[in-house]
Image: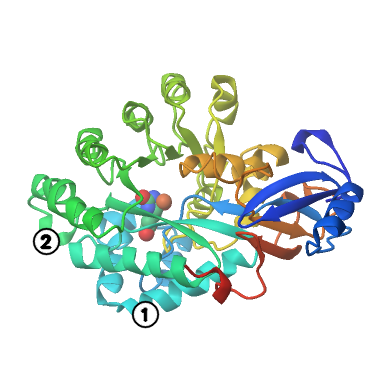
Amino acid sequence: MVEGGDPYGAMIDAAVAVRGERIAWIGPTREALARAKRQGARVHNAAGLWVTPGLIDCHTHLVYGGDRVAEYEMRLKGASYEQIARAGGGIQSTVTATRAATFDDLKASAGLRARRLMAEGVTTLEIKSGYGLELATEQRMLEVARQLGRELALSVRTTFLGLHALPVEYRADRRGFVDAVSGPWLTTLHAADLVDAVDAFCETIAFTVAESAQFLRAAAQLKLPAHVHAGQLSDLGAAELAADVAALSADHLEYLSASGAAALRRSGTVAVLLPCAYFTLRQTEPPPVALMREAKVPFAVATDCNPGTSPCTSLLLALCMACTLFGLTPEEALAGATRNAARALGLGTDRGTLEVGRRADFALWRISRPAELCYALGANPLAGVVFRGWPRVSDMIPAAQKN
Ligand code: DI6
Ligand code: FE
């Protein structure tokens, strides 16, 4: 660690000592070298590099079949996301492709996307299901996410996005679908240990507040925490719902009222900003960041990687857009991909900061100051990664770490 500059709480000429997979000590390099010599510890020289916590992408739909390139072309010719969705395209077309994809197909394409994120210093990644809309495919998506977490030098948190879109076969029976998702599907996936959290797309083109509440409350009975897709296209009161169920995060929030922001603050729910979706949809009303700051709502930034509204596998690009399009400061954006992203996943006391006792996940950067991580479009200044205390020399988990 070199150089200083306060907003980040940075230390100049510092060293981090690791024991097992935890940070054991942080202090001046000179002292670290003396201690290492006494203890015979191995020393890695990161002179001239900046060290940050490993980046955390706390909102992705990484596992899916097919792509939506043709839809992109339609949108460029003037069709809106809502028009495409109402005409049976959009999410539905990805559902068809995902149902047709095998476990190996899904693992191969999602693995490629995960590696792209890892190449930019991501060490923890959230992955949602939601493109199956039938139990077997939802299960396969979550199994792929779990498998990626086992194989890659990356932590994966899974989210059962039970209410994403209404599948064709339930078109005449919305209630039956919400009941199935909130009942037997949830129970089965939870019993298979595939679910770390749940999520609902609460929106005019998706599910109502009451439907979302039914699902999120059923999950709460199983002690599963919630995320909510809230206020992406309109303000239905989904932020208030997120607060009511003490959700870990409310995500998107382009449309958020003062009372919604106050509710999020009271429940300690993190606002996850997704500027790459905003950019892709060419939205024009950014989330009310000033209101969030005023209400002291913590905010995170994520890619929302998905084939429709955010075909993005660069968290650094999301940070850039969070600053340029939403007006975040680079300090806020970086906290949004580290400390607050950890909080948004319920991991705030485990990782996301450089502190003694936290997990030893770091990214090392060849930059002159932290804001450079937000500033440069398409650059990748990553110099190295430490994951669970081990230098990540390849994408795969080293044998020594398997347990
Ligand atoms: N909001 C989104 O931006 C994605 N899902 C959601 O609930 C879009 C998903 C898609 O278009 O495939
Ligand atoms: Fe999303």
Toward the viewer: 387 or 228?
Answer: 387
Q: Residues within 10 Å of mark 2 (few under 14, many from 20)?
A: few
Q: Which residue is mark 2?
A: 169
Q: Secondary structure at mark 1?
A: helix
Where is residue 118? Give x, y as percent. Answer: 60, 65
Q: Which residue is mark 1?
A: 105
Q: Secondary structure at mark 2?
A: helix
Where is residue 80? Give x, y as percent. Answer: 39, 53
Horizontal side of 56 relative to 393 (left or right) equals: left
Toward the viewer: 38 or 46?
Answer: 38
> Which comes before the other along the chain, label 1 or label 2?
1
Q: Is residue 68 visible?
A: yes
**Is residue 208 placed above or below 150 in the rendered structure?**
above
How far apart are labels 1 and 2 at the CA level? 24 Å
Mark nearest the camera among 1 and 2 is 1
Asked if the residue under mark 2 is in contact with the one under mark 1, i.e. CB atoms within 8 Å, the reply is no
Q: Residue at x 25, y 34 (%)?
A: 209
**Given the image, on which type of amino acid does mark 1 rest?**
Asp
Q: Residue at x 71, y 39 (%)?
A: 331
